Amino acid sequence: MTSLVPERLRGPGRTELLAQAVLLLGGVLLVAVVGRLAVTTPQAAVIIAVAVLAAGLTAVQPGLIPLAVLPVLLVVLRVGGGGVDLSLSDFALAAAALPALLLAKRPFSSGLRAVLWASAIYQFATLITVVNNPYTANAVEWAHAWMMVSGSLVVGWAVGANGHARTGIRLLVGTMAVLAVITIVEGVVHFAHGDFAPVYPSFPYGMHKNFAGTVCATGAVMVYARPAWVGINRRWTFVLTSLLLAAVLFTQSRQALIGLVAAVVVLVLRSDSDRKRSRIVLLLIAPVGLFVTNLVQDQVQSGNQFNSVFQRLTWFQDSMTVWSADPWFGVGLRWWYTDRFPFQFQPPNAEIEVLTSAGVVGLVAFVMLMVVTLRVAWKLDPAYGSLALAVLVSRLVQGQFDLFWAAVQGSVPFVVLGICLGAAWHAERATEVRTSDPAAAPRVPVGSA
């Protein structure tokens, strides 16, 4: 590259000066372009400006952008339409995934590589249905699903491997706690007016009760798991758990409660866990199971064919009708956005959704992806893996009664897994450096138990 520089500009300091001049010229041109677009296409100007800012920050600290976008990953506000119906969470994830992939710490751990390969196999299996059923929503969802799994993993890895795991988990839990406060406040207001219906948070935008309930239940699982490196003490554990659980109860989201109970059972019964938990907790959560059972019984006994229980049974039957159109390869991702069938709903079950969308081939690949993911979390050092395992179990159980491939609910568990894998990798590197050169070892924060 030096041979391309004229002779008179060569020499100590001159090449660097030329490089600075080129960068300055590029900056001036960029400002001119952004200024022009600000008048004609302001959205494009904002995107370019944010991309340049992200590139600059990423060059300074590779893990900073993935860390900064973690709270935005919980924003489910919808953007777009006509099959390109995504959320701000999806755009934030895509914006963070590229710098995370390019500048993430290497080499990837064996566990991260295993899940990435399983995700690639699932994407290959579902690519068949994308080719067989060409329409916009199909292709968009194919890329969306890959981003929710692989993109989320890499973003989480970038946070954890760069030493920001504690801050990352705290940001997620803190954002979930804010949502819990909003839900509780609205619930109290409704109760004060004699309205005891499930709470659908409306601030700062409308949210479904199952979304709010699922997110708050995930937060409760993360707080209860309480790995030492996150540094959440017992007092804050009690406060946050109570807050998040209360929010879940206000939403009356049955699948969120069931997922929460399943995660707690896994944490309590796991014998090789990093933290011993009293089995008395199982007695304390038993009323939650009774609460859910009573809600279901009330709906069944009501005889209302349009309540959530009977509606789900109808959806399951209709899903089988859709699946019969192409049992092996499915009728396409997001088929409910098309007018090929008389049904317009997303199946409220993970396996049934995949079965209708990608057929038996896609379902086999999906099951393999989930098995590999759970196995990686289980085999990870319990100091890091217990948190990831609990969140994944909670999500999978929730996905048996609700939408699975959905923004936030689908991406956050894989982000948490990526953070835990990265945190374990960072701790291992720190131990190796400390052993070889104690003075050069990076500081690894250890939270209070």
Image (cartoon, helix red, strand yellow):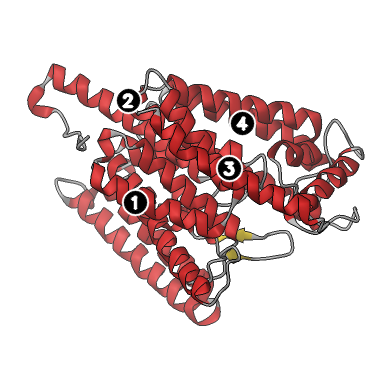
Residue type at the position of mark 1? Leu
- Tell me the SS state at disc 1: helix
Residue 303 in the image: x percent, y percent? 82, 55
In the image shown, does 399 or 238 lie closer to the viewer?
238
Q: Is residue 305 above or below residue 145?
A: below
Residue 226 in the image: x percent, y percent? 32, 37
Residue type at the position of mark 4? Ala
Residue type at the position of mark 3? Leu
What residue sits right under mark 2 in the picture? 276
Q: Distance from label 2 to label 3 (Cα)? A: 26 Å
In the image shown, does 393 or 75 lie closer to the viewer?
393
Can residue 98 be seen by looking at this rendering? no
- CB contact under 8 Å: marks 4 and 1: no
Upstream in the sequence, badge 4 or badge 1?
Answer: 4
The furthest residue to the left: 439
What residue sits right under mark 4 in the picture? 120
What residue sits right under mark 1 in the picture? 240
Q: Residues within 10 Å of mark 2 (few under 14, many from 20)?
A: few
Q: Is residue 33 above or below residue 150?
A: below
What residue sits right under mark 3 in the picture? 290
Q: Which of marks 1 and 3 is in front?
A: 3
165 lies left or right of 294: left
Residue 325 in the image: x percent, y percent? 92, 40
Upstream in the sequence, badge 1 or badge 3?
Answer: 1
Can residue 162 be seen by looking at this rendering? yes
